[in-house]
Amino acid sequence: MQRMLFLVIGICVLTAACGSETKKTATAKPAAAASNAATESAYCDTARQWSVHEIVPVNEDDPVAARKYWGEYTAFNEKASGLAPAAIKDDWNLSVEAINNTLGPVLEKYNFEFARLEKEGSAQEKAIADQPPENVQQAQAAIHRYESDVCAAGQPQPADVDFSGEKKVVAYCDAIAANNDMVNKVFADGAKPADVRKLTTSKEFQAVIEKEHDSAPSAIKADRDVLYSFWKKMQLPLQAKYGYDFRKILLDGPRADRETLQSISPAVHDNYARAAAYEQQVCAQ
């Protein structure tokens, strides 16, 4: 069960591409140049603030903590939907309606006690809590694409490329899984700069990155070459420059630094999206 966190802009910025362990629900369109006005808008500021908010872990097994988070989440939805640009205004309206009128009442009914919902809830209620309807998923995918490609509030969405016929390269997928595991542990603890630095500079983590590069399947070998070089030459120095503080880069850094951090720079956007598509379609199976 995905619970209530189904409109979250993920942050996975320790490497150029951390991979995906979820099923394919959305695809990315080719990167488009965002105007400076759009990137520096109040909407994008709000999106980046929320992505930073999401770094702080929430104990959803605690109903009090879950309810508090829900209040913050719905406040973000209200603010963001009010500021949303025309390109995603209808998507926001559809998403907010589903959150407020469909998901919210279910969570309130069970007092944000997810174990109780799982035990006592009807099949329909469990389905609502598990994931939104297809049309809402697509609306939220459009929001995520805008917030990543324009706002630098997240990484590129998986590309619209079919890798279903590709053979799984176990060594590569194992490296992606190890990367995800190491990164997730740091973020579960709040991604403190000291912890980020410790992980990023560790021999164990660097060995995983090397394994990702060296074992990359032929279908995305060229993409991984680009991502590896970008990580070494651009992302590692950027993280060191800001003291391994993602929050500072996202909230205070100039546009170029935010784009580098999130791999939405035109230099790597499409490479990241292709690698993410492979990992989502092949590694996650």
Image: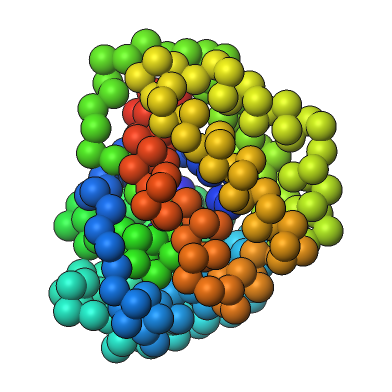
Residues 177 and 254: in front is 254
- Visible residue check, residue 102: no
* The C terminus lies in quadrant: top left
162 lies above or below 22: above
Q: How is the image coloured?
A: rainbow
229 lies above or below 255: above
* Residue for point 70% across, 39% down: 182
- Visible residue check, residue 41: yes
Residues 125 and 232: in front is 232
Residues 265 and 248: in front is 265
Picture coordinates of residue 100, whole percent (x, y): 32, 78
73 lies above or below 282: below
Picture coordinates of residue 90, whole percent (x, y): 16, 74
Q: Is residue 131 left or right of residue 234?
A: left
Picture coordinates of residue 45, whole percent (x, y): 45, 81
* Residue for point 43% across, 22% down: 221
211 lies above or below 261: above
Q: In this view, does 206 lie to the left or right of 129?
A: right
* Residue for point 59% across, 50% down: 234
* Residue for point 56% across, 36% down: 229
Picture coordinates of residue 19, whole percent (x, y): 49, 37
Total marks placed: 0
Query: In which quarter of the view is residue 222 placed?
Result: top left
